[in-house]
């Protein structure tokens, strides 16, 4: 029996994984999809026509980049629900406006007019009763030291060259964002309390918590 059936998780459920860089979103996405018999939805980076230009000139390209991400994530969200659900999604549409676009605005790499245009478009597209919000958002969290250790271990060159102050700011922004997030139910998981790579059985207690959240619609503090 697959764990979805054991814990009564609907076959059409849509679960989104959120959290800062290095927290293990892709690993959790794959582990949950395998255990529940769900499809996966991963962020498409290679086809982004603005990404290279953006890294060369934040101020010129930040608005274009965020609009592109918004459009692509919106289309992906619609596709997931048109398939009839049954998906684990790596990264949410909500993080773009709540964290990245706001950070560009705060730092002056996105103008006030562009930021207002972007947030107005986001609200019109996403923050409505007609948009198919996930059944559950799983937020992966850990201390900044935990996150820095993971970034160091996975050894991606661009991340290694990024100043530690950037990761600290991103960590703070994510915590502020999730504490004010209300678009769908949230299950918070501390990354020190499981290891789905080293211990396959650690995924089952997480699935039990997911079941309680989705079926009972009650918050869980862990």
Image (spheres, rainbow, N blue to C red):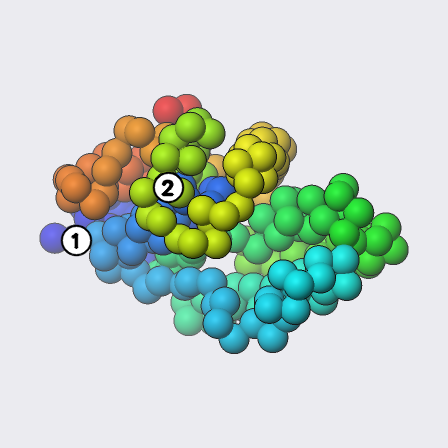
**Residue drawn at (16%, 53%) of the image:** 2
Residue 12 visible somewhere in the drawing: no
Number of residues whose C-alpha sits closer than 10 Å to that of mark 2, classed few (under 14), some (14–19) or many (20 or more) = few
- Sequence-first tag of 2 and 1: 1
Residue depicted at x 58% and y 48%:
95
Q: In the depicted view, which residue is nearer to us: 4 or 35?
A: 35
Q: Nearer the viewer, residue 197 or 187?
A: 197
Query: In the figure, residue 206 lies in which quadrant?
Result: top left
Q: Are marks 2 and 1 in contact (CB under 8 Å)?
A: no
Locate residue 163 relative to residue 71 in the image: left or right.
left
Per the image, label 1 sits on a secondary structure element best described as loop
> What residue lies at 31% left-to-right and 29% top-to-bottom?
192
Task: Note whether 19 is above or below 144 in the view shown.
Answer: below
For residue 88, what is the image quadrant? Answer: bottom left
Numbered tag placed on residue 49 in the rendering: none
x and y percent of residue 209 in the render? 32, 35
**Along the line of sight, which residue is nearer the eye, 139 or 48?**
48
- Image: 110 above or below 222: below
Image side of residue 51 versus residue 211, left or right? right
Q: In the figure, 20 relative to 73: above or below?
A: above
Coordinates of residue 177 in the picture (x, y in percent): 61, 36
Q: Which residue is mark 2?
A: 152
Q: Is residue 14 left or right of residue 33?
A: right
Determine which of the numbered discs, if any, sits on residue 2 in the image: 1
**Which element carries disc 2, helix, strand or loop?**
helix
Q: Is residue 121 left or right of residue 166?
A: right
The C terminus - image quarter: top left
């Amino acid at each position: 029996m697959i764990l979805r059936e054991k814990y009564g998780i609907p076959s059409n459920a849509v679960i989104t994984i959120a959290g800062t860089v290095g927290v293990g979103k892709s690993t959790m996405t794959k582990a949950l999809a395998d255990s529940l018999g769900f499809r996966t939805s991963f962020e498409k980076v290679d086809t982004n026509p603005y990404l290279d230009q953006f890294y060369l000139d934040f101020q010129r390209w930040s608005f274009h980049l965020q609009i592109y991400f918004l459009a692509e994530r919106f289309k992906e969200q619609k596709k997931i629900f048109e398939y009839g659900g049954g998906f684990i999604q790596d990264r949410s549409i909500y993080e773009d406006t709540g964290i990245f676009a706001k950070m560009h605005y705060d730092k002056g790499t996105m103008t006030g007019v562009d930021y207002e245009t972007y947030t107005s478009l986001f609200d019109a597209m996403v923050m409505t009763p007609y948009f198919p919000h996930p059944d559950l958002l799983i937020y992966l969290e850990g201390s900044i030291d935990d996150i820095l250790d993971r970034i160091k271990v996975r050894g991606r060159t661009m991340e290694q060259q990024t100043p530690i102050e950037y990761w600290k700011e991103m960590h703070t922004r994510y915590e502020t964002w999730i504490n004010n997030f209300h678009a769908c139910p949230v299950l918070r998981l501390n990354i020190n309390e499981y290891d789905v790579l080293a211990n396959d059985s650690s995924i089952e207690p997480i699935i039990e918590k997911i079941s309680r959240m989705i079926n009972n619609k009650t918050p869980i503090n862990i």
